[in-house]
Image (spheres, rainbow, N blue to C red):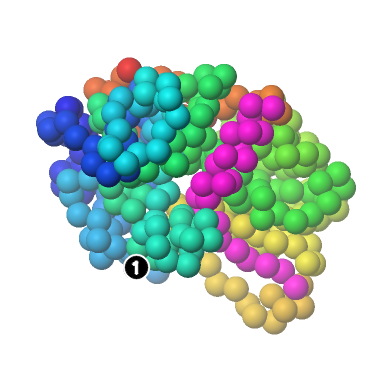
């Protein structure tokens, strides 16, 4: 089968040939139909995360070595199964969304259902070969999610961008009718976050983005207030709206996190999900006196992805704008994402 791999960090993804996998044990193999292109893929291509202050988190130090077959928003047709894979009759040939954030399967985190927080992650498209390929191997059919009724290109995006936004918003504990929720950054995950926030019943949502086109997009998707966080009166606008009860930072750089934390009213919470990179400094006395919470949120659990898919099937979430790109144009897709010129999500499709 053909796959697309990072052979050397910082270089374009290249096509590679791999032998077809014969599933053993509980493994299943899907023929990839769609695979979303995510910012995390850019970090995997670069080989590091920027930690701020000139420091880097090198992927080699996390045990990630090329070749890496990227792609963690994978939707595909189930084509074969190992002898011990428990499957319903008729499952072969059906299309499924893959939950990619696998752990070791045996530690306390994994056993309580938080595989995405496992200390020995096995994520598909990061630590295991992903969906930038004709086929993708999944260790157990419990990671296959029935998305029948959802358009496949859109469905693929729920495995990362949708799930990341959903899991962050589930951590937001405010009065959905009265309190102001601030979303920082309207990239693919941010826009997904706005739509899911609407679906979850948040009624007062402010969106900050430096790009006027994205602010316009936010207004069209239900935001109550949009602004450029660099404007001198940005903080005053939020204060006039009653202050921010909770902020979700979908960018995760110094400017966005500083702004989000500073904008919180007393008792407010800021959840950082973006991995753009950088660092912030927090003075401790105001942290105490304002009684604020700063929290990270990393993708989401298998149960959360199932909850999200159920919410989508209920018809309460507007579809994210998606654009299909041929698998052979993967480098072009990565370059466009890097340049920041994508509305919604790019999805490789065949
Ligand atoms: Zn992702
Ligand atoms: Zn584990």
Q: Residue at x 42, y 49 (%)?
A: 101
Instruction: Give x and y (percent) for residue 145.
Output: 49, 34
The residue sitting at 72% across, 59% down in the picture is 263
Task: Give the x, y percent position of residue 189.
Answer: 54, 40
- The quarter holding residue 7 reads top left
Of 184 and 110, the residue lying toward us = 110
Q: Residue furthest bottom?
A: 285
Compared across the picture, whether 19 is left or right of 136 comes to: left
Q: Against 84, is 271 above or below?
A: below
Residue closer to the observer: 37 or 263 = 37
> Is label 1 within 8 A of ligand 1 (CB to nearest ligand atom)?
no
Question: SS class of the residue under badge 1?
Answer: strand
| Quadrant of the rendered image containing residue 104 | bottom left
Magenta-drawn stretch contains 298: yes
The residue at the point 72 percent across, 79 percent down is 288
**What span is colored magenta in the figure?**
291-314
* Residue 14 figure quarter: top left
Q: Residue at x 51, y 29 (%)?
A: 146
Residue 157 shown in magenta: no
Q: Is residue 85 above or below residue 254?
A: above
Q: Where 16 sits versus 153, above or below? A: below
| Residue for badge 1 | 55
Viewed as shown, does residue 239 lie left or right of 349?
A: right
> What is the x, y in percent for residue 139?
33, 44
- Position of the N terminus, as image quadrant, is top left
Asked if one can make out residue 11 in the rendered structure from this viewpoint, the answer is yes
Q: Is residue 41 visible?
A: no
């Amino acid at each position: 089968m053909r796959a697309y791999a990072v052979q050397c960090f910082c270089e374009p993804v290249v096509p590679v040939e791999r032998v077809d996998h014969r599933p053993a044990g509980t493994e299943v193999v899907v023929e990839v139909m769609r695979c979303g292109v995510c910012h995390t893929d850019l970090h995997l291509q670069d080989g590091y995360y920027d930690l701020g202050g000139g420091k880097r988190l090198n992927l080699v130090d996390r045990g990630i070595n090329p070749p890496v077959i990227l792609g963690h928003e994978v939707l595909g047709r189930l084509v074969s199964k190992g002898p011990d894979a428990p499957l319903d009759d008729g499952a072969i040939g059906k299309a499924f969304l893959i939950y990619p954030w696998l752990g070791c399967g045996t530690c306390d985190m994994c056993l309580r259902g938080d595989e995405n927080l496992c200390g020995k992650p096995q994520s598909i498209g990061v630590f295991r070969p992903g969906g930038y390929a004709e086929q993708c191997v999944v260790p157990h059919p419990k990671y296959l999610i029935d998305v029948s009724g959802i358009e496949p290109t859109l469905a693929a995006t729920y495995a990362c961008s949708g799930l990341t936004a959903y899991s962050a918003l589930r951590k937001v504990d405010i009065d959905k009718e009265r309190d102001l929720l601030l979303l920082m950054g309207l990239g693919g995950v941010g826009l997904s976050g706005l739509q899911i926030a609407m679906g979850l019943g948040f009624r007062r949502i402010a969106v900050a983005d430096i790009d006027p086109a994205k602010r316009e997009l936010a207004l069209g998707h239900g935001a109550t207030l949009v602004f450029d966080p660099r404007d001198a009166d940005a903080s005053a606008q939020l204060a006039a709206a009653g202050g921010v009860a909770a902020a979700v930072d979908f960018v995760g750089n110094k400017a966005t996190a500083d702004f989000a934390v500073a904008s919180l009213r007393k008792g407010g919470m800021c959840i950082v999900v973006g991995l753009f990179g950088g660092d912030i400094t927090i003075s401790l006395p105001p942290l105490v006196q304002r009684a604020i919470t700063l929290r990270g949120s990393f993708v989401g659990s298998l149960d959360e992805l199932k909850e999200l898919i159920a919410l989508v099937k209920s018809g309460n979430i507007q579809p994210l704008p998606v654009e299909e790109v041929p698998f052979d144009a993967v480098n072009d897709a990565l370059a466009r994402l890097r340049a920041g010129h994508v509305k919604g999500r790019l999805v490789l499709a065949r």
